[in-house]
């Protein structure tokens, strides 16, 4: 009894051990590593953009994004999706996990989150931050709206950069998830919708009239998100961030398929999805 | 010692019956619910990056991006733009004397005339911008240095501006509008004249209204209420240090453009994101009959009242004339970027297709060796 009370897991029969290791243990390792890699990626990307902006703002530590966005980014816009992935993700379902015990090997070899994996994640973040800053920079350089007025102002640029970031990290999460339940879908699209809802309501007339100093971005969302070249910039940035990842992963599956890939392909071919 | 309620022969998941000895009365069932949610059996879609999804996606993206890029590039090329730097850096430039002789105590404005010619006529509405280079409107201390409550017409903030405006918060009296952004308001005056082939000058009418965002002009910036006479409303405040006239004299003839809601002031207060930027100065309306171009080909003179010093920080001032399209001003970057990304995507699709045919099929066997 004392052993049970002081242990992380306890079970009554030895045959439960197989399920604990091969299914739950493996899933737990997978989820933890995916969560960590993605969390580092989204926060490094978010931060490295400021590094590039420093060269253009006199190294004065001016933030690229709105202060409210910085507060709400980890709290509201990207919290639930990554939580959903770390709770529900499965690369291979439980029956197939029993049939192919060598799926457990990557965990033993520490392959999913090692120094190499972390370094690759950081490299990916650097690339994403370059795209996320320099594409909007070049698109907004000396540009104006379609009625001739300003769009290269700080607030519009901040809104553009943050919208690109949120959409890109959402697409990246969709690529990382291998098990799309209804709950996951709701979390991801709900968070994205929440971003637009919160942004529009914070940048509305009412909030500014009541709290002028706290919500100075009034009118920015309306005036810049109705411009076609803003949306074209967002589309280009998101696709450019994500395409190399897709190409790289596809190449790996073709040239060096792991056991997970092979089992995954089998799963698809026989239509055995729970 | 084995827990009394368990029986080795028991089936997995069955509730222990009355065979458990030592158990008191009814047993609580600690088994989790056999629902899809709790047993992680939720119906789900498991997408896999197969050749059947990835390769068509690459080709489709390539085929969509290239026409978009071509459209953007062609549109940008059709926009006419003319830019002229009038800082007066070279000794040969017309504004050299003005740039050298600047002093803060000047009551006499320096004027200079810059000649230029347009090779092509400009149709439809033409927008005149002033551009600044090496001017960091995005410096953090500069961006913070404003009081949005005061600019929104709040009477308390008018008399006691925010601390963020330091050191431009008060000089013997509170400054309205306070802060470094307002203090550095661009105050050059630009006028445009067309020179007929027979030598006579015609002034080109410049419209100075409708240059700021509607939300800025009508919601964000408001004059303090209480009196139609702005001189009375702004009593007890002083003008910013580097201004020549106070805020209620920015446009005394037009009460809709005076005080905080002056459109030049609003445009300046919308700080730029990058150190090289342009701001709308005025609009040259198209002619009522669509026959004559707004700005015909020929010689022009730009008369500059040179009030704004930029030489000290190696900045540059320029005047830009530009037409507009659905994608805004002339910026070929998006068009070129779309064409590049589209072609790279298409080529990558071809490369991946060849790799898939050579190597992919070989690995796609049903055998999974351990």
Image (cartoon, grey):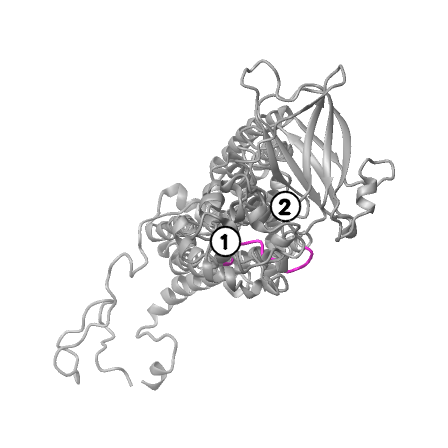
Q: Is residue B266 visible?
A: yes
Compared across the picture, whether B19 is left or right of A17 comes to left
Q: Name the residue under label 1.
A: B232
Q: Give the range drawn in magenta.
A: A58-67
Circle 1: is it few (<14), some (14-19), or many (20+) Cα within 10 Å? Answer: few
- Viewer-side residue, B187 vs B35: B187
| Residue B198 place in picture, x, y as percent | 76, 14
Give the residue number, with chain letter if any, for mark 2.
Answer: A134
The image shows residue A26, relative to residue B325, as above or below, that is below
Q: Please determine if labels 2 and 1 lie on a single subunit.
A: no
- Examine the residues drawn in magenta and state their main secondary structure: loop
Mark 2 or 1, closer to the camera: 1
Using the image, determine if residue B63 lies above or below residue A107.
Answer: above
- Above or below, A167 against B24 in this view is above
Q: In which quarter of the image is the N terminus of chain B?
A: bottom left
| Residue drawn at (17%, 82%) of the image | B23
Q: Position of residue B116 (x, y in %)?
A: 76, 27
Residue A224 in view of the camera: no
Q: A229 or B358: which is nearer to us?
A: A229
Residue B305, labelled with which disc? none
Residue B222 part of the magenta segment = no
Asked if marks 2 and 1 touch (Cβ < 8 Å), the reply is: no
Q: For numbered disc 1, what is the local secondary structure?
A: helix
């Amino acid at each position: 009894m004392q052993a049970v009370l002081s242990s992380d897991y306890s079970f009554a029969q030895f045959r439960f051990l197989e399920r604990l290791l091969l299914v739950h243990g493996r899933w737990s390792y997978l989820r933890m590593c995916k969560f960590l890699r993605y969390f580092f990626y989204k926060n490094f990307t978010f931060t490295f953009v400021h590094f590039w902006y420093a060269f253009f703002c006199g190294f004065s530590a001016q933030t690229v994004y709105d202060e409210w966005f910085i507060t709400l980014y980890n709290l509201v816009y990207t919290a639930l999706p990554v939580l959903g992935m770390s709770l529900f993700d499965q690369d291979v379902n439980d029956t197939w996990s029993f049939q192919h015990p060598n799926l457990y090997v990557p965990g033993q070899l520490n392959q999913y989150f090692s120094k190499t994996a972390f370094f690759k994640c950081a490299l990916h973040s650097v690339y994403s931050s370059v795209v996320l800053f320099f594409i909007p920079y070049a698109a907004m350089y000396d540009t104006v709206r379609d009625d001739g007025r300003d769009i290269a102002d700080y607030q519009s640029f901040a809104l553009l950069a943050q919208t690109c970031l949120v959409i890109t990290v959402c697409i990246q999460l969709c690529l990382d998830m291998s098990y799309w339940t209804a709950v996951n879908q709701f979390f991801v699209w709900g968070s994205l919708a929440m971003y637009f809802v919160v942004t529009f309501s914070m940048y509305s007339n009412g909030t500014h009239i009541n709290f002028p100093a706290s919500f100075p971005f009034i009118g920015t969302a309306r005036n810049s998100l109705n411009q076609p070249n803003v949306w074209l910039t967002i589309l280009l940035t998101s696709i450019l961030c994500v395409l190399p990842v897709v190409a790289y992963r596809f190449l790996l599956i073709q040239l060096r398929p792991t056991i997970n890939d092979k089992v995954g392909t089998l799963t698809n071919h026989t239509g055995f999805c729970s | 010692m084995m827990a009394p309620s368990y029986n080795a022969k028991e089936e997995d998941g069955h509730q222990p019956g009355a065979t458990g000895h030592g158990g008191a009365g009814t047993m609580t069932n600690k088994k989790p619910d056999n629902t899809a949610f709790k047993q992680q059996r939720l119906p789900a879609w498991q997408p896999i990056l197969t050749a059947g999804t990835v390769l068509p996606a690459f080709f489709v993206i390539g085929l969509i991006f290239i026409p978009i890029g071509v459209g953007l590039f062609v549109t940008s090329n059709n926009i006419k733009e003319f830019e002229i730097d009038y800082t007066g850096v070279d000794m040969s430039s017309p504004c050299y004397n003005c740039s050298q002789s600047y002093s803060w105590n000047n009551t006499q404005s320096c004027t200079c005339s810059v000649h230029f010619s347009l090779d092509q006529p400009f149709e439809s509405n033409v927008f005149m911008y002033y551009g600044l280079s090496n001017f960091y409107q995005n410096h953090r201390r500069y961006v913070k240095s404003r009081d949005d409550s005061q600019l929104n017409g709040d009477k308390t903030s008018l008399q006691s501006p925010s601390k963020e405006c330091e050191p431009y918060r008060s000089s013997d009296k509170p400054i309205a509008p306070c802060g470094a952004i307002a203090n550095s308001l661009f105050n050059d005056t630009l006028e445009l004249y067309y020179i007929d082939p027979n030598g006579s000058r015609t002034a080109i009418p410049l419209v100075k209204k409708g240059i700021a965002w509607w939300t800025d002009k009508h919601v964000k910036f408001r004059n303090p209420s209480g009196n139609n006479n702005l001189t009375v409303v702004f009593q007890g405040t002083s003008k910013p240090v580097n201004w020549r006239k106070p805020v209620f004299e920015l446009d005394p003839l037009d009460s809709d453009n005076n005080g905080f809601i002056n459109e030049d002031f609003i445009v300046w207060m919308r700080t730029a994101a990058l150190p090289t930027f342009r701001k709308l100065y005025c609009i040259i309306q198209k002619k009522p009959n669509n026959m004559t171009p707004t700005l015909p080909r020929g010689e022009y003179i730009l008369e500059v009242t040179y009030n704004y010093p930029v030489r000290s920080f190696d900045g540059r001032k320029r005047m830009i004339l530009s037409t507009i399209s659905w994608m805004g001003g002339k910026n070929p970057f998006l068009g070129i970027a779309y064409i590049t990304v589209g072609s790279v995507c298409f080529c990558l699709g071809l490369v991946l297709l060849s790799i898939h045919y050579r190597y992919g099929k070989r690995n796609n066997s049903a055998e999974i060796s351990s």
